[in-house]
Image: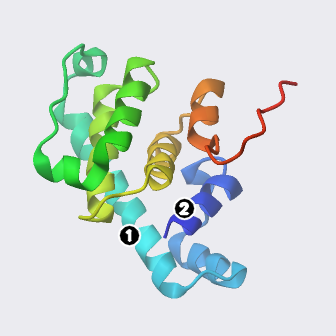
């Protein structure tokens, strides 16, 4: 599923640039994605749109600038782990995610699995939440989302 999501992000600048679902399924199949992966990814994106509509309409605009502290319940900690929670808190403290976006990320991460989600998968979820809202990650966020901890070479500045 995550490979399909990354492919969509890389191929289509905005979600509204994607072809209709039937044509998109054909294109993804032609590229070589498995039908189950395609179905899971498109279902996940549909649910993302519904979650975004639901949460965005549920909270007043002031909530997007809240300075409150988010307390995670045990189920969330079990599914996210401390590294993912720390990453979410970093993005929020850096003002790269607002509280509503944070909740969407958490909900979509929990929808993926009841087991511990990897930090790499969480980064894809964050990217897809922003992509679905038509927001382009800034340079700092893009580096955080795609920086490979296993790569000993520092990135070159151009």
Q: Residue at x 33, y 63 (%)?
A: 112
Indicate the quadrant containing the C terminus: top left, top right, bottom left or bottom right: top right
- Disc 1: CA contacts within 10 A as few (<14), some (14-19) or many (>=20): few
Q: Is residue 99 left or right of residue 122?
A: left
In the picture, residue 50 is in which quadrant?
bottom left
Residue 98 locus on image (x, y percent): 35, 25
Residue topped by disc 2: 5
Can you give x and y, in whole percent of width and height, for residue 18 in the image? Answer: 60, 60
Per the image, the residue denoted by label 1 is 43
* Quadrant in the rendering for residue 46: bottom left
Q: Secondary structure at mark 1?
A: helix
Q: Residue at x 49, y 78 (%)?
A: 37
* Residue 51 in view here: no
* Residue 75: image location, x then y, percent: 14, 53
Residue 102 in the image: above or below residue 80:
above
Give the percent coordinates (x, y) of residue 137.
58, 32
Q: Is residue 128 left or right of residue 29?
A: left
Q: List the single residue furthest toward the left.
A: 73
Does residue 70 show up?
A: yes
Q: Secondary structure at mark 2?
A: helix
């Amino acid at each position: 599923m995550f490979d399909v999501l990354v492919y969509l992000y890389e191929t289509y600048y905005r979600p509204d640039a994607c072809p209709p679902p039937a044509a998109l399924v054909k294109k993804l199949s032609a590229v070589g994605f498995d039908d189950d992966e395609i179905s899971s990814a498109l279902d996940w994106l549909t649910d993302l749109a519904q979650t975004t509509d639901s949460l965005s309409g549920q909270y007043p605009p002031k909530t997007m600038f809240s300075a409150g502290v988010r307390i995670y319940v045990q189920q969330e900690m079990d599914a996210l782990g401390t590294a993912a929670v720390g990453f979410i808190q970093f993005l929020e403290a850096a003002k790269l995610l607002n509280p509503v976006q944070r909740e969407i990320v958490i909900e979509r991460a929990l929808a993926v699995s009841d087991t511990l989600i990897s930090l790499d998968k969480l980064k894809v979820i964050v990217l897809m939440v922003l992509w679905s809202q038509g927001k382009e990650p800034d340079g700092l966020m893009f580096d955080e989302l795609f920086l490979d901890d296993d790569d000993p070479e520092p990135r070159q500045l151009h």
